[in-house]
Image (cartoon, rainbow, N blue to C red):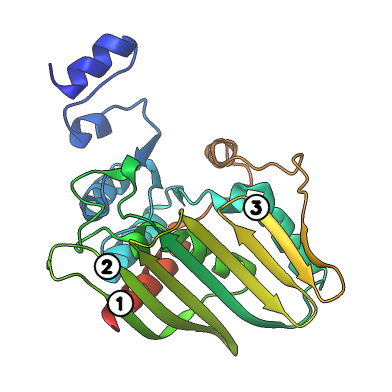
Amino acid sequence: MNSLDHIQKKYGEVQTHASHSDLLNQDHIDLVYLAVPPKFHHEIALNIISHNKHILCEKPLANSTDEAREMYEAAENKGVINAMNFPLPYHHEFLKMKEVIAQGQLGEIKRVEFHMYFPEWPRAWQQNNWIATREQGGFIREIGPHYLHLTTRLIGIPSCRQSFVDFPADPKKSEVGFMARLNIENIPVLFNGVSEVGQKEYLSYKIYGEQAVLELRNWRELYIRTKEKGKEKINVNINQHVSLMDELANALDGKEAQLVTFEEGYQVQKVLEDILKMS
């Protein structure tokens, strides 16, 4: 029994298709979620767009800057709703970070740092045939886009000034470590990561201000540090909830919607490719 037969037998009412081209010929389908590995995004996305279907795409947007630009331009020219699955902007923590910065609690922003550490890459639950490859995998492409996009939403679009990426001897394997210096106007941004280290997975995103330091730790833990009070955990307002699915529904209904667009995905893609190419 193949995978499609297994899904059909298990769920019954779920409609399955042997190819995305077959799916796109279904008139009742308005929106397609593109969740294949990155190197297949470009061709399939352009096919989705050419059929006037709206599209939600996984990150990174594509497997190169040129592909990402073509996808973004095609979606804009066709006028289809285009969105990316970046969950952080819909988290309560992001809304609180945005509020803290807007209120001036950090003062002048001096630096941004993002550090990621992995005991192994890929993680145990990500063992597949592409996520460890240099061609389209690695933690720069898998985790980096989330925090690059977070930076663009909170502070501005960064540009890569210098990067050093460490690759293993096997030319097919993805990076094992990197350090990159980015800039947002006069604000330095440090992007750093390493795998195969003797600790649990740890992600830390910090915004250093002259009055306080704001940290998002391990996706969902938010802290603020000041000289007077030291480190304090910030409790977020769980009523400030934005759902990607709700926002997509709003967009499909012609209402105002908060979506991460292909244009934003293209901006992130440019930084990703620069980090990987400048080493």
Q: Secondary structure at mark 1?
A: strand
Q: Secondary structure at mark 3?
A: strand
Frontmost residue, 41 versus 182: 182
Count the labels in the image.
Answer: 3
In the image, residue 71 above or below residue 104: above
In the image, residue 58 above or below residue 68: above
Do the CB atoms of the residues marked 1 and 2 lie less than 8 Å apart?
yes
Q: Is residue 110 left or right of residue 49?
A: right
Residue 151: x and y, percent?
56, 69
**Residue at screen point 46% across, 53% down:** 200
Read off the residue under disc 2: 175
**Residue at screen point 34% across, 40% down:** 125
Q: Which mark is residue 221?
A: 3
Circle nearer the N terminus (3, 1): 1
Q: Amino acid at mark 2?
A: Glu
**Residue at screen point 30% across, 60% down:** 138
Circle nearer the N terminus (2, 3): 2
Q: Which mark is residue 165?
A: 1
Frontmost residue, 191 versus 227: 227
Q: Amino acid at mark 3?
A: Glu
Residue 142: x and y, percent?
36, 57
Residue 52: x and y, percent?
34, 43
Using the numbered discs, state the Cα–Cα distance from disc 3 to disc 1 in whole angstroms. Answer: 28 Å
Q: Secondary structure at mark 2?
A: loop
Quadrant in the picture for the N terminus: top left
Using the numbered discs, state the Cα–Cα distance from disc 2 to disc 3 in whole angstroms. Answer: 27 Å
Q: Which residue extends farthest bottom?
A: 186
Decide if residue 85 is in sight here: yes
Circle nearer the N terminus (1, 2): 1
Mark 2 surroundings within 10 Å by alpha-carbon count, few (fewer than 14), some (14 through 19), many (20 or more): many
Q: Which residue extends farthest right?
A: 228
Frontmost residue, 8 versus 122: 122
